[in-house]
């Protein structure tokens, strides 16, 4: 089980990314538009830099929904390999059987 603080920090980041997504996209569009004057593009870049760091989507990290583990994460199932193995062994995942020989 991951530290609760790490899980809560990730939730906080997700909320912040959602909150600033529209503003960030708008500023990026202005900053990357070649037809706009250089000064306007530069101002958009400065405004973009003043936004909180955690509002950037690249700072999000996938975590297991059950344990909060950040590594060995299956995107399709949203759980880690360890949680997947435990659920499979208990027979809670349809069609999955843990093999042993």
Image: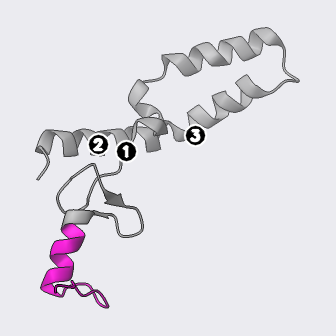
Q: Which residue is mark 3?
A: 22
Q: Name the residue located 29 percent from the left edge and 42 percent from the top edge.
A: 10
Instruction: Give yes or no for contact between labels 2 and 1 (Cβ–Cβ under 8 Å).
Output: yes
Q: Which residue is mark 2?
A: 10
Q: CA distance from mark 2 to mark 1?
A: 6 Å
Circle 1 residue = 14
Q: Earlier in the sequence, mark 3 or mark 1?
A: 1
Q: How dense is the environment of label 2, judged by Cα within 10 Å: few (below 14), some, or many (20 and up)? A: some
- For image coordinates 49% across by 16% down, the residue present is 50
- Is 5 magenta? The answer is no
Quarter of the C terminus within the rendering: bottom left
The image position of residue 83, as x and y in percent, is 19, 67
Q: Residue furthest front?
A: 101
Dots 3, 1 in contact, CB < 8 A: no
Looking at the image, which is closer to me, 80 or 8?
A: 80
What is the secondary structure assignment of the residue under circle 3? helix
Q: Position of residue 23 (x, y in %)?
A: 58, 33
Residue at the (21%, 52%) spot, across then down: 69
Dots 2, 3 in contact, CB < 8 A = no
- The image position of residue 4, as x and y in percent, is 12, 45
Q: Is 81 situated above or below 87?
A: above
Image quadrant where residue 40 sits: top right
Q: Who is closer to the viewer here, 78 or 8?
A: 78
Based on the picture, tell me whether residue 87 belongs to the magenta stretch: yes
What residue is rendered at 44% in x and 40% in y? 17
Farthest-out residue, bottom: 95
Q: Secondary structure at mark 1?
A: helix
Q: Is residue 59 left or right of residue 70?
A: right
Q: Which residues are magenta?
A: 83-101
Task: Report which quarter residue 97 is drawn in.
Answer: bottom left
């Amino acid at each position: 089980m991951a530290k609760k603080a790490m899980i809560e920090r990730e939730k906080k980041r997700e909320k912040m990314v959602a909150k600033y997504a529209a503003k960030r996209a708008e500023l990026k569009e202005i900053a990357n538009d070649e037809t706009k004057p250089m000064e306007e593009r530069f101002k958009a870049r400065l405004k973009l830099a003043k936004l909180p760091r955690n509002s950037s989507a690249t700072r999000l990290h996938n975590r297991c929904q059950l344990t909060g583990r950040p590594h060995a994460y299956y995107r399709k199932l949203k759980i880690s390999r360890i949680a997947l193995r435990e659920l499979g062994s208990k027979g809670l995942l349809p069609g999955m059987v843990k093999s042993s020989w």
